[in-house]
Amino acid sequence: MSGKSPRMISSGTGILLESGTSSGAVSHLEIFASIGDFVRRYYIDPIILDTSYNPVDTLTWAIVLGLAVLGLLGLFRRLNIRIDERLVVCTIPYVLAGSSLRVIEDADLVMPPASYLLITPLIFFLVFFVTAACLLLTRRVLGNDFYRGYAALGLIWTAINLALLSSAGFRNAWVIAAVFSLGSALTGVLLILRLRLPWLDFLDDRFNLMILYAHMLDASSTYVGMDWFGYYEKHVVPTFLIDLVGTAAIMYPLKLLILLPLLKIIDSYIEDPSLRNLTKLTLITLGLAPALRNTLRLALGV
């Protein structure tokens, strides 16, 4: 979307303000128009056109994610729900549901404007509200023993999505095995290294292992998609690094360089168990959701 640069807008505003009241009205219109152009260029167009992320919306959604984590923490405390390993495991079906729902849009099984709800970031809000509704419903109906019912609703949702996707036909079903084999092999290497490197003792925590496995799957799906099928990366930093080295295999060391110290820091400095576990659930989602979406897209050939 074309539009004036911030510097040109600023200069034009100063000149118009000096020229009189009517010019001031025009100035205000130009300001609103420039704001509208900014919002459309960096937020609306990427959703409607489903294009790559840009630095502006990347930073915005990162801030929204952080605020959402804090909001969820307060909500769980108010509802007296413990964020433990059991809750995390029971929430994973909703991650699967969200990923498969996103692929429904990729496969053009839903048309605009409804399809816009299935594009980032709107799909995050949609999945969040459905997940929260299922959690609150099962807890109200089943009481403290809501876990199985909560997980079951997520699995049913996932099954419905996969049934819809199967109607499109899996052209490259072998990709699913390839991605999971690569991710599992690399996670296995980390476990072997754990036996030789004492500082990797935080991998004894099952949460941490789930996080690394999810992100190894994500790296594997990116590598297979880009290097084998010619897909492109949507995120800003990975795109820069992949273009720099010429292969998406850079995602493996990149994720390890970020995750290994990050997990150590989380375990060492976040003392609140609920905040620590919710942070880890967020990290699992950030790895598992794109991994599953990428893998399903490749398998479907869309």
Image (cartoon, rainbow, N blue to C red):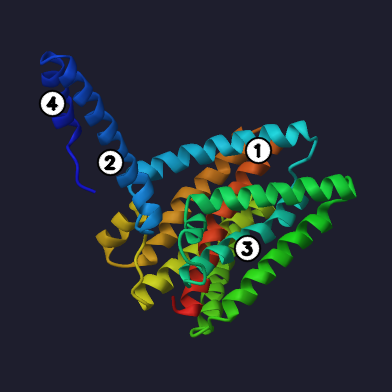
Q: Is residue 82 above or below residue 216?
A: above
* Amino acid type, callout 3: Leu
* Quadrant assignment for the C terminus: bottom left
Q: Which mark is residue 37?
A: 2
Height in image: 220 above or below 60? below
Looking at the picture, tell me which residue is in the foreground, 255 or 103.
Answer: 103
Residue placed under numbered mark 1 in the picture: 72
Q: Mark 1 belongs to which amino acid? A: Leu
Residue 239 visible in the snapshot: yes
Which amino acid, mark 4?
Answer: Gly
Rounded to the nearest angstrom, the CA distance separating label 4 from label 1 is 44 Å
In this view of the protein, which residue sits in the foreground, 244 or 75?
A: 75
Rendering quarter of residue 58: top left
The numbered mark at residue 96 is 3
Number of residues whose C-alpha sits closer than 10 Å to that of mark 1, classed few (under 14), some (14–19) or many (20 or more): some
40 or 249, which lies in front?
40
Instruction: Locate residue 160: give its quadrant.
Output: bottom right
Label 4 Cα neighbours within 10 Å, binned few <14 / some 14-19 / many ≥20 = some
Compare marks 3 and 2 and give the one earlier in the sequence. Answer: 2
Determine the residue positioned at 84% across, 51% down: 146
Label 3 crowd (10 A; few <14 / some 14-19 / many >=20):
many
